[in-house]
Amino acid sequence: MTIEELFQKANKDRIELKGHQKKLKAVLLKNEYFDVEKEYWDWKLTFSSLSFSALLIIFSVSIISSGGNTNQVTLESNDFYKTIESSPNVSGMGEETFNGEKTNVLQMVEGGTTTKMYFNNRNVLVHSEVYNK
Amino acid sequence: MDTDVKELVERAQNKDRDAFGSLFDLYYDKVLNYVFRRVLNTEYAKDITSNAFLKALKNLDQFEWRNGPFSFSGWIFKIATNEVNQYFRKQNRYKLTIDDPDFKELGDNNKVVEEIEKKIDNDKHLLILNKAIKQLKPIYQDILHLKYFEEMSYEEISQVLNKNESTIRVYSKRAKEELRIILEKDASEFLVNI
């Protein structure tokens, strides 16, 4: 029996969850995405941008204070990565190439701000992008 | 149909609720079934599908139609695939990101869910394949599911996984070879009895 035949034998019946579909659709359609953008100073948005910037500064300072000790930098980078990765509002976006280097991308959504963070194979943050709605 | 989808996407990006609702109805079953076959758990399939659609909505403004006819389906399956892989990494720490109290109320009655899970429990072929596939590298798992369960072309898969088509072909071949080795080792008795 080939692999293809084995896949064919597996049940491919479609499942239907109409109740879930209906509720999810209703929730999505009342999402703030559809509200008209308003031109005013949004303290939540500013605060979330500032809090992430502060996090990056603390991380950078910790690298500098390590005096260039590569092992320590990697260790602290791993701690930083694990902290970010385990946050409930953070999810993985897969791999992307940044500056010719393969990176693992995490995305943090906070209020109206989306932050994409690019980590190299040693879990060192090499780049970040902040999108404000 | 591609023109219709493109038009719906453009309207949804212009905050048209009806257009997004139509896109949602068009892709809900496809995404749900893909996710369900990956995780074989109804509750997690619901959470992952919900998170994927919420993420798609929040990132809709950043979507650009630039990869031909499969642009949008490739994009939405990419989000779903990332969510599935996130679930495999986090396991029981994986959480629904929608905190609307109305949404958390029971959506489908327990009988529907029980029937689905009973059907799965009786499907030895699906269970054994799923168990074997889970032992492969994540990208091999993605490819096998997209190719053999979702019946996507290599071109579509290349868009979902952001790799070129020739790489997907090579990976697909390797994935099948590794799957065969695992099945021969772990499920040879079962395979003989088919």
Image: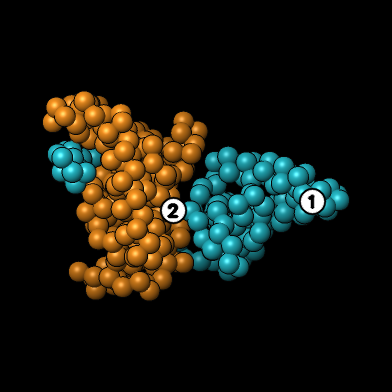
Chain colours: A cyan, B orange
What percent of the width, then of the height, locates residue B157?
Answer: 32, 59
Q: Is residue A43 above or below residue B66?
A: above
Q: Looking at the image, can residue A24 be seen?
A: no
Residue at the image point whose x is 54% and y is 63% from the top: A97
Dot 2 amino acid type: Lys
Which label is found at residue B55?
2
What percent of the width, then of the height, locates residue B94?
Answer: 47, 36
What percent of the width, then of the height, locates residue B4?
Answer: 23, 70
Q: Is residue A57 above or below residue B109?
A: below
Q: CA distance from mark 1 to mark 2?
A: 33 Å
Which label is found at residue A63?
1
Q: Looking at the image, can residue B133 be seen?
A: yes
Residue at the image point whose x is 23% and y is 47% from the top: B149
Looking at the rendered structure, the number of numbered marks drawn on it comes to 2
Q: Secondary structure at mark 1?
A: helix
Q: Left or right of A123: which side holds A68?
A: right
Position of the N terminus of chain B, as image quadrant, is bottom left
Dot 1 amino acid type: Ile
Q: Which subunit holds the residue at mark 1?
A: A
Category of crowding for the residue at label 1, using alpha-carbon neighbours closer than 10 angstroms: few (below 14), some (14–19), many (at least 20) = some
Marks 1/2 in contact by CB < 8 Å: the verdict is no
